[in-house]
Image (cartoon, grey):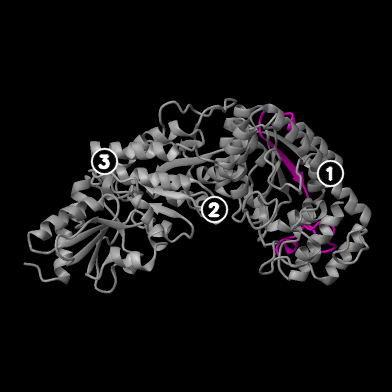
Amino acid sequence: MANALRALAMDAVERAKSGHPGMPMGMADVATALFTRFMKVDPSRPNWADRDRFILSAGHGSMLLYAIHHLIGYADMGIDEIKRFRQLGAVTAGHPEYGHTFGVETTTGPLGQGLTTAVGMALAERMMNARFGDEIVDHHTYVIAGDGCLMEGISHEAIDLAGHLKLGKLIVLWDDNGISIDGRTTLSTSTDQLARFRASGWDVASVDGHAYHAVVDAIAEARRSDRPSLIACRTTIGFGAPTKAGTEGAHGAPLGATEIEGARQRLGWSHPPFEIPENVRAAWLGVATRGRAAREDWETRLAASGRRAEFEARIEGELPADFDEKLTAYKRELSETRPNVASRKASEMVLGIINAATDLTLGGSADLTHSNLTLTKGLGSVAPGDYAGRYVHYGIREHAMSAVMNGLALHGGFIPYGGTFLVFSDYARGGIRLSALMGQRVVYVFTHDSIGLGEDGPTHQPVEHLAMLRATPNLHVFRPADAVETLEAWQLALHAEGTPSVLALSRQNLPTFRTEHTDENLTGYGAYVARKPKRRRDVTLLATGSEVEIAFRAADMLALRDVDAAVVSMPCWELFETQSADYRRQVLGTAPRVAVEAAARLGWDRWIGERGRFVGMNGFGASAPAPELYQHFGITPAGVVDAVCDILTCA
């Protein structure tokens, strides 16, 4: 059975003239032990809620996963798809892609992301178990990780958090082959990985990865632990290849016809390429038969529990029927009370309503809870062995936080949101990109969104970060200008089931300008005219977030010079782009435009046009109180007036 995996892997890579045969050939015995004895999956129901999760963190070895899926009968993984490995339009992409192929639990491209996402899945399993019990939620998360996954810095964040939280249903199978692209791993590392995992609170074991029964025994032992487990599986990369086994030559290139013929002889595999003997195929299909029986037993238990509708709604992430009604009522209150608060504070206020209205939301912060204001009354902290709470203390681990939130969202049952400073989105970037690529409803609460944080200095003052985030496809970047827009941004983020969202929130107070209530979510248009010109439109002032206030004040100053300005709030460029061309023309107008944002100019030219001007950052910030910084960089009402007068003749 293991040799069938090896044969399909080396044949598919050879046909594609591209790929990574070494890892699938080396880990074939481990994968066979895992799937034949433990994995609880049903290919006829790939998304069955209580299935075990299998994460191929070493995603370059994707043919291992595809070969297994073919042999256990996933409907999309016929032999023709194996033959089309790495070709345009095939489900057998070079790295496993979530949503593209049945049974792929997460996109694993950058090394270490799969391992960390799996921590989120294992955490979600424990949290759902705390809510629904063993009869409904009781499954494992298994990971195959390579040397590269464990070298990446995110792996330290992941194993530390998982060990601390005692995620006993997480089992990592390490492909301990000692080879990376450059050669022996001793070229770049001498870490004792067993000691590292043990120090983080994991159970650890070491086995011969080519000894089926030793692997079975090690997994069985790990399943009995109340802590996460690492099983170091000592393997030979490219196992069976006569000259390339155990070398970097087996890692990322086809073996070649001669080497493959030699491997067939060494492995005792005499069958032609892509041909699997019926007895071997039948043995693999037994995995699916066992999984189907487990799934049917679970469905019977779920039906008998009396909680089926509740559980299914939870897994699907369905917001309560009265959710929008409660938010709209609070929006009316905000318009009436007109709070003068930072948008991070407005976010906390809105979250108080949201978290009381639905149990789906799961909060957290990378050790900035009382700066991000992401914790609301009654959530309770998630703690080791106690998973009933709704707030995760991620520690100073921005990168892990983003990937763990992906795992929580992928598992189902939660809408995760997590906070840090906007400038540290750099550290969370890998996970954010995968949130967008996989279309996951993950909400990033990024506060301290400009030079408005003042004295901490340029290392903490985001300048280019909005441009980076806005450049990411399928990511909604909200920069709300007052409490009402903040509420509307949260409402949109929680309804965006196939798109992650960023909320860029201020540290400084912002007045509420949306003082006339409307049930309509104006932020949903991406941009709208916040102040109409009184007679004619001489100029259009475009602004986001904390700079909308500056645009309003500049419009007042321009009126004294007989210049009639329209003010446009642009809380979300991405949503504005989806509006009709006619709507965009109405909002932007035909008059000259001046954009105001305490950030880099990149991206603004598409909105201001050739005649436009930009008032914002032309370099890094500095350390000083926020008002002084805004004055120093000219991001002031007077600075806006000067920009307008640079275009127009002002009285």
Find out whether residue 231 is within the magenta segment.
yes
**First reached walking from the N terminus: tag 3 or tag 2:** 3
Q: Secondary structure at mark 2?
A: loop
Residue under numbered circle 3: 335
Viewer-nearest residue: 451 or 646: 646
Question: Rounded to the nearest whole Å, what is the CA distance between mark 3 and mark 2?
Answer: 33 Å
- Examine the image and state in which quarter residue 326 appears: top left
Residue 50: image location, x then y, percent: 69, 38
Q: Residue at x 42, y 56 (%)?
A: 469
Q: Can you see residue 186?
A: yes
Q: Is residue 614 left or right of residue 24?
A: left
What's the residue type where badge 1 is placed? Thr
Foreground: 546 or 385? 546
Residue stretch in magenta:
223-252
Depth check: give the residue in front, 519 or 529: 519
Secondary structure under tag 3 reads helix
The quarter of the picture where residue 619 lies is: bottom left
Is 159 located above or below residue 4 in the figure?
A: above
**Mark 1 sits on what residue?**
289
Q: Amino acid at mark 2?
A: Gly
Q: Which mark is first along the chain, 1 or 2?
A: 1
Horizontal placement of 623 versus 159: left or right? left
Mark identifier at residue 439:
2
Q: What residue do we see at 90% from left, 51% from top?
A: 282
Residue 20 image point, x, y percent: 72, 61
